Amino acid sequence: MDAPTGHGRWPLDPESTVYVAGHRGLVGSAVLRRLQAEGFRNLVVRTSGELDLRERPAVDRFFDEVRPDVVVLAAAKVGGIGANSAFPAQFLSDNLRIQVNVLDAAVAVGTPRLLLLGSSCIYPKFAEQPIREDSLLTGPLEPTNDAYAIAKIAGVLQVQAVRRQYGLPWISAMPTNLYGPHDNFDPEASHVLPAMLRRFHEAARDDVPVVTCWGSGTPRREFLHVDDLAQACLFLLRHYDDPDPVNVGTGSDVTVAELAGLVAGVAGYRGRIEWDASKPDGTPRKLLDVSKLRALGWSASTPLADGVAATYDWYRRALEPVA
């Protein structure tokens, strides 16, 4: 890997050995596609069956063998409000083990450059909007996903600790709500946007008169297409060197009710949308302040309507054999 040239520019050699952890997931698959498109030739991936990142000895052996120049840590146990509320112990334990094992193994072999991907849920539930990076650890978390958030906060702090103790220029980025190809469309474990895509697609297909969505519909959410995030990841690896996490988002948001209307239209659903206020809303608003990333020279480019339409097309082709 090329030697760093300071805070402004980190050339990435296409011959560098780049390990993308979690390459089958929403984020990892997008990062892998971007790296391939930009001509990186020494890309290393492992399925969870080939390498369980929760198993320390296996991770140590893998890093000792591969000795990557760059690591993008996109592997994580993820889910929506329902899954996070039902299985907090697994979300905490699995994500802590994945992060600690990968980061410790990368330290042991002196991996020069590492990007840890976290989540906007690390910020306090009632953080001032839009949420700045310095709001981290300034208030209580959203209870429905606090276990996952604590694990991700631990990852951010471990990256900072590695920088202080070992001088390695590792970085962390906090994406907003993501969507796109290879998302999880499981009705019990998915996030709000893919869950809506599946629900409204099936409702339109089956001519269901009413679709009931969780909550009041009033919370506001920001959504970033995962291909934009992948571009941002490579941009940060080339241009960012700071212990503080950097937010990655669009800088704009919509209400969940507005999102439901958009998704219903894309899916061709013409029935009625109702709201079950007995279900949790989660955080009232979660809009990231992306001024730091914009000042570095990067902004998202995919409009939400275009991204949702493209994701719906992918879902119908790849996950719905009988459309």
Image (cartoon, helix red, strand yellow):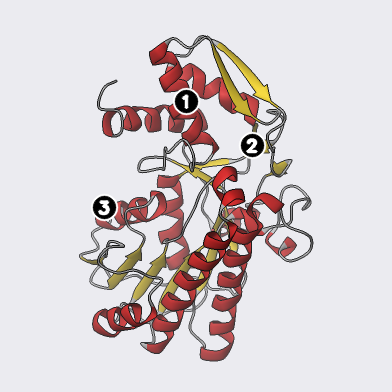
**Which mark is in front, 3 or 1?**
1
Q: Earlier in the sequence, mark 2 or mark 1?
A: 1
**Which residue, given by chain and number where applicable, does mark 1 sit on?**
199
Q: Earlier in the sequence, mark 3 or mark 2?
A: 3
Residue 127, position as x, y percentages in the image: 77, 53
- Distance of mark 3 from mark 2, alpha carbons? 29 Å
Query: Circle 1 — which element?
Result: helix
Residue type (three-letter) at the residue carrying disc 2? Asp
**Which mark is in front, 2 or 1?**
1
Residue 137, position as x, y percentages in the image: 74, 66
Query: Circle 3 — which element?
Result: helix
Query: Circle 2 — which element?
Result: loop
Disc 2 + disc 1, Cβ < 8 Å: no
Asked if residue 256 is positioned above or below residue 292 in the image, the reply reads above
- Which circle marks residue 253 in the picture? 2
Q: Earlier in the sequence, mark 3 or mark 1?
A: 3
Tell which residue pokes out farthest to the left in this image: 41
Q: Which of the 4 image quarters holds residue 254?
A: top right
Q: Which of the 4 image quarters holds residue 135?
A: bottom right
Q: Is residue 26 left or right of residue 243?
A: left
Asked if residue 293 is positioned above or below residue 311 in the image, the reply reads below
- Distance of mark 3 from mark 1, alpha carbons? 33 Å
**Which residue, given by chain and number where applicable, does mark 3 sit on?**
37
Quick one: 86 or 171, which is closer to the camera? 86
Asked if residue 91 is positioned above or below residue 207 in the image, the reply reads below
At a point 50% along the width and 24% down the height, the residue shown is: 263
Residue type (three-letter) at the residue carrying disc 1? Arg
Q: Are there few (<14), some (14-19), or many (20+) residues within 10 Å of tag 3?
A: few
Residue 33, position as x, y percentages in the image: 29, 51
Q: Are there few (<14), some (14-19), or many (20+) residues within 10 Å of tag 1?
A: many
Quadrant housing the C terminus: top left
Quick one: 22 or 160, which is closer to the camera? 22
